[in-house]
Image: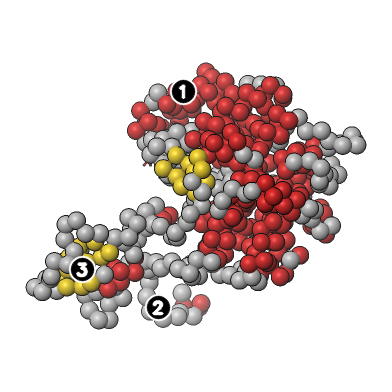
Amino acid sequence: MTTQSQAGSDNRGGAGTDTLTVTDNRTGQTYELDITDGTVRAMDLRRMKVSDEDFGLMTYDPAFTNTASCRSAITYIDGDNGVLEYRGYPIEQLCQESTYLEVAYLLVFGQLPTETELDQWVHDITVHTFVHENIKDFMNGFRHDAHPMGMLLGSVGALSTFYPEANRIKDAQNREIQTIRLIAKMPTLAAFAFRHAMGQPYVYPDNDLSYPGNFLSMMYKMTELRYEPDPRLERALDVLFILHADHEQNCSTNAVRAVGSSQVDPYSAVAAGVAALYGPLHGGANEAVLRMLRRIGSKQNIPDFLQGVKDGNERLMGFGHRVYKNYDPRARIIRKHIDDVFEVRGKSPLLEIATELEKRAMDDDYFVSRKLYPNVDYYSGLIYEALGLPVSMFPVMFAIPRTSGWIAQWLEMVVDSEQRIARPRQIYTGAREQDYVPVDRR
Ligand code: SDX
């Protein structure tokens, strides 16, 4: 960036150059800001001052609606055209051809594995699915009706105490083993939380089963010697895991990056992601969708419900997105897999309500004008319900696969030389220089 006074401006920038010419009307000074990758550096604004003592200009962007926080090569989204790619591979092809563990490798290492690399990766994940026995005592400390997301949040954070060496984040080998442990142990923690809530004994991992198959076993195995997962459910779960694996700088990933920027261990950073995902506007939306559909109760009640949304008394959960201003491609894929699951587990009456609700909303200008389309959370809950999961487990089903996205983003952040501790500025609106008043004189 260069600064010219109005009088002496040479036209270094001008039409056709990747620069922004800005005149500060407070001083008449003109500035040339470089445009790089469609952005201007916020720090370039700090040179725009009205005096030498002036702090300079900042950007003001609540919720970061128009702020790039990092450079990332992991996930590409084109919100207007409903495009989602992991490391450049379209989500549709990955759901068709790949497995969740292969996609997790792709997100973490940046390329699809060779057969040898994949076999080693699957082995490494498989043999790290056990958790320390103390975790069971920890889990038992929760109330019987504790929300599984709260239990997962506490357990993931607690894992950092079992692996104190995880805070050696500059050590690449150490980062890799913690990456493997987090991806491997998340389903175990999730299943333990479910079994605790159900008052059932914990089921240990079965290393002869696939990643989704082992999760189903830890969730549902009872007195049978070996749990045999239905391959149709196993595949539907694997596709759901692929669809939820990463989504660039969403709220929970931003939390992981921000907390991770303090150079804390990855378990604590991922626990921050679990906490953010818990919210009903984010990963908690799939739980909120099911509760919404149950509350609507029948197709006849849909017009009144939609009117309630327009009156601001309701929110159409599972609709809308900060980035997608078109149909979320993940919702389209999930919708296709619902029939496979219903074939095994029986059809949910809520599907008819969900389908009719989507149709009515898509025909209604209130939603179309606000570019509100179904997102990933709109139909996923119907599959989880069909799998026999309580609604409170739905956000946990989101957290399991999103762990590979969180850890991939954390790994990218840790080695990014441009990144430092995340510490935004503010516009101060409070009082200044108040004199203390003793309590008997207030
Ligand atoms: C996820 O970021 C990601 O990538 C997230 C995610 C991922 O993979 O990580 O994709 C996962 O979180 C999906 C979103 C799940 N959340 C929900 O389904 C909850 C319902 N949706 C919303 O609350 C909302 O759409 C958000 C939170 C998803 C997006 O919020 P924004 O971008 O801040 O949009 P907004 O709230 O400013 O809404 C813009 C307008 C507003 O209308 P006006 O006040 O301007 O008139 O649209 C309205 C909102 O009131 N609106 C809705 C609505 N969503 C937005 N109105 C009714 N129902 C809705 N669902």
Specify the quarter for ligand 1. Answer: top left
x 89%, y 34%: residue: 224
Q: Position of residue 105 (x, y in %)?
A: 62, 50
Q: Secondary structure at mark 2?
A: loop
Q: Where in the figure is residue 170, as x and y percent of width and height?
A: 61, 71
Q: In this view of the protein, can residue 410 be seen by the observer? A: yes
* The residue positioned farthest toward the top in the image shown: 300
Label 1 packing within 10 angstroms: few (<14), some (14-19), many (20+): few
Q: Is residue 191 left or right of residue 245?
A: right
The disc placed on residue 31 is 3
Residue 287 appears in the picture as rendered: no
Q: Which amino acid is tagged 2?
A: Gln
Q: Secondary structure at mark 3?
A: strand
Give percent across and percent down for residue 254: 51, 57
Give the quadrant of residue 365.
Answer: top left
Image quarter for residue 59?
bottom left
Q: Are marks 3 and 2 in contact (CB under 8 Å)?
A: no
| Circle number at residue 359 | 1
Q: For the point 45% across and 31% down, which residue is it?
A: 308
**Residue receiving disc 2:** 434
Three-letter amino acid code at disc 1?
A: Lys
Q: CA distance from mark 1 to mark 3?
A: 51 Å
Q: Residue at x 46, y 23 (%)?
A: 359
Quick one: SS at disc 1? helix
Q: Marks 1 and 2, Cα distance to the nearest angstrom?
A: 58 Å
Give the camera-side residue of 379 and 125: 125
Viewer-closest of 124 and 35 = 124
Callout 1 touching callout 2 (CB < 8 Å): no
Residue at left offset 45%, top offset 79%: 437
